[in-house]
Image: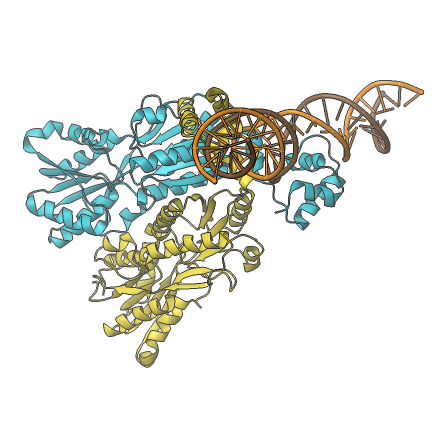
Chain colours: A yellow, B cyan, C orange, D brown
DNA sequence: ACATTTATGTCAACCGGTTAACATACAAAA
DNA sequence: TTTTGTATGTTAACCGGTTGACATAAATGT
């Protein structure tokens, strides 16, 4: 590895001059600037960002913690986050928490030690205090960590409501809410999520004519999910309308219905959540709740960077959702 | 941020002693060690890894360049790579190249400047020389950069051959090979890929009784792919066997067939490639060529780390593939 | 009683840059 | 002619750690 002194020597100038060229500071003649750049190219010099970051106390790095990038929702999210981070000259350190408390803890420590300037939490398994004591800019994605940490979400309550409204409009009577267990993206041990609450809200007016089951998924591999869901539907053969907490789960439900020879949407209607690419490629294509993922990602990066700059940002950043009707309703 | 001098002061010991505790070197009494650790916890001290990395000339960071993490194949790959990197105490800097020459170039520079110890290339758009002059350990994933760069692949030739063998066994006559264009994961402008060659090889014995079309995809969004493929199949209504270069494309073909009311597998048979989670969740579930992605990822990390350690590694690392028969054949 | 081992400290150099302060030199402007 | 602006150099401190050399002292072993 060549270093700045090599450049200086070869260009016949002082290290200070090279540094001035590198950082566009002070007076530099065009001749010198060109000469320095030429030498840099010649000896293939690349400034050591570790050293620069150390001195500047600025790493230009963001830590991203997600449960599992392999999950379509998080892989799309990660893609957009990387896109906007890059645009703002930030790089991304990727961490899969696997929803494992100790791994998340270790990763958070690692990120701090590596002087990341902020963390985006797509995962959340630790107790709230752990995040509050972090003393680092954080943005929580679709996960309300606490009142004191900015969170980017979509209107989950409305999403749930839109789902039940549509199912009811389509004459479904026996509803089910299926949500991600440990493996899914939307792990929230309690049912008391906005999504579910919204779904309930939408059922309110016709409550007496409707029934509702809830089902938490245990498996995470899709093949197993299909099996598990087929079992569930077999046990509850009257279910004619399902709201799933993610498109993956909804797709597994579709698959389970095919196994059981239930016709979609005639015998049973299904609504997913997220509107990931997957939803257009299953059969029939999935009716789902769309979150404006790209815009949300953009704001996430923006909020994080503004916090890094020391600005105050709003804690509650909710985006509108919409229902995308496709073939499963 | 607290630093090592703060710890030393508060613990009433010298900085050297704290460093010795931190790095387990030299003689340290249990009493001192405990005291130092206690103080670290008290003042919430985290060693600055930038400073340590700088001194050690070792960043413990790996750069990963993929075309697009949102693509299921790459998101699963990324997941496994992260898993094994973490296990070996390496962290991952994630880069999406978007198959953009200048972005890939910039990212490679950025990675070098940030002192990554090696790069995993899941993407490849630059000319070979660019990678050779890198002077950094590289492993290419499923992409033969050059004879001088270790590559981890699966037996693409066999994969292609297995595909045509099965289609022929199932009495298909009019075959098609559909491969990813600019948006897909397997962009290789030329048809002269092992996969395609293997497919041809499998057709050899019955060449006179078979026909073959090739189709390059132009779109990248699944919705557009479906449309494009429906058009293609409509133009070529006799096609009864399709081999796709990825499961995503295969899934889009399934969808196109539904649109055109072609029965799968009766009217037309489809084989995908990769065996990603997606393949079990489409209808009918996809027959596909399985690559042992997890094992391949593990070896990728292993090869990279061994290069980092200065060991020589084998350039050609091909894994066996197998065909997984599901509902589309 | 003396040699070793253990435990800690002081000091300075180093990793690869950045930067402030100050000095010098030459050119153009007032 | 004096001032000012431009261009570069020298030196040293600094970012936050690590490490080797060397010194000192107490505890332990023989």
Q: Which residue sits at x=39%, y=54%?
A: A219
Between A54 and B297, the residue placed more toward the observer is A54
Give the side of residue B107 with respect to residue B274, left or right: right
x and y percentages locating residue A241 in the rendered image: 28, 68
Can residue A235 be seen by looking at this rendering? yes
State how many labels appear: 0
Dividing the picture into quadrants, the one containing residue A270 is: bottom left
- Quadrant location of the C terminus of chain B in the rendered image: top left
Q: Is residue D25 left or right of residue B253?
A: right
User: Residue B276: where, in percent of width, then height?
Assistant: 31, 44
Quadrant hosting residue B235: top left
Where on the picture, by quarter, is residue A188? bottom left
Observer able to see residue B292: no
Q: Position of residue B130 (x, y in %)?
A: 34, 26
Looking at this view, is B174 or A146 the one in front? A146
Q: Position of residue B213 (x, y in %)?
A: 11, 36
Q: Does residue A191 lie above or below A224 as drawn?
A: below
Left or right of D30, for residue A21: left
State the residue in front, A266 or A286: A286
């Amino acid at each position: 590895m060549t270093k700045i002194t090599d450049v200086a020597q070869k260009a016949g100038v002082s290290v200070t001059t090279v540094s001035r060229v590198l950082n566009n500071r002070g007076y530099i003649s065009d001749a010198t600037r060109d000469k320095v750049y030429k030498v840099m190219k010649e000896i293939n010099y690349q400034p050591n960002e570790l050293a620069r970051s150390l001195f500047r106390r600025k790493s230009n790095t963001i830590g991203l913690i997600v449960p599992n990038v392999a999950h379509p929702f998080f892989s799309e999210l990660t893609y957009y986050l990387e896109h906007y981070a890059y645009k703002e000259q930030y790089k991304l350190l990727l961490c899969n928490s696997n929803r494992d408390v100790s791994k998340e803890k270790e990763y958070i420590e690692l990120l701090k030690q590596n002087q990341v300037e902020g963390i985006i939490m797509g995962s959340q398994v630790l107790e709230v205090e752990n995040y509050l004591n972090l003393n680092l800019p954080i943005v929580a994605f679709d996960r309300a960590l606490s009142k004191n940490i900015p969170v980017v979400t979509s209107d989950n309550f409305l999403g749930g409501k839109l789902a039940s409204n549509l199912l009811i409009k389509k004459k479904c009577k026996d509803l089910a809410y299926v949500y991600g267990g440990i493996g899914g993206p939307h792990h929230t041990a309690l049912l008391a999520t906005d999504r579910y609450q919204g779904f309930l809200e939408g059922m309110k007016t016709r409550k007496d004519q409707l029934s509702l089951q809830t089902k938490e998924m245990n498996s995470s591999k899709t093949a197993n999910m299909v099996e598990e869901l087929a079992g569930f539907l077999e046990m509850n053969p009257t279910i004619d309308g399902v709201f799933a907490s993610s498109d993956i789960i909804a797709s597994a439900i579709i698959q389970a219905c095919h196994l059981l020879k239930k016709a979609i949407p005639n015998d049973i209607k299904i609504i997913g959540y997220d509107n990931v690419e997957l939803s257009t490629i299953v059969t029939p294509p999935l009716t789902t709740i769309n979150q404006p993922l790209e815009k949300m990602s953009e704001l996430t990066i923006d909020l994080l960077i503004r916090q890094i700059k020391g600005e105050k940002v709003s804690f509650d950043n909710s985006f509108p959702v919409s229902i995308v009707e496709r073939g499963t309703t």
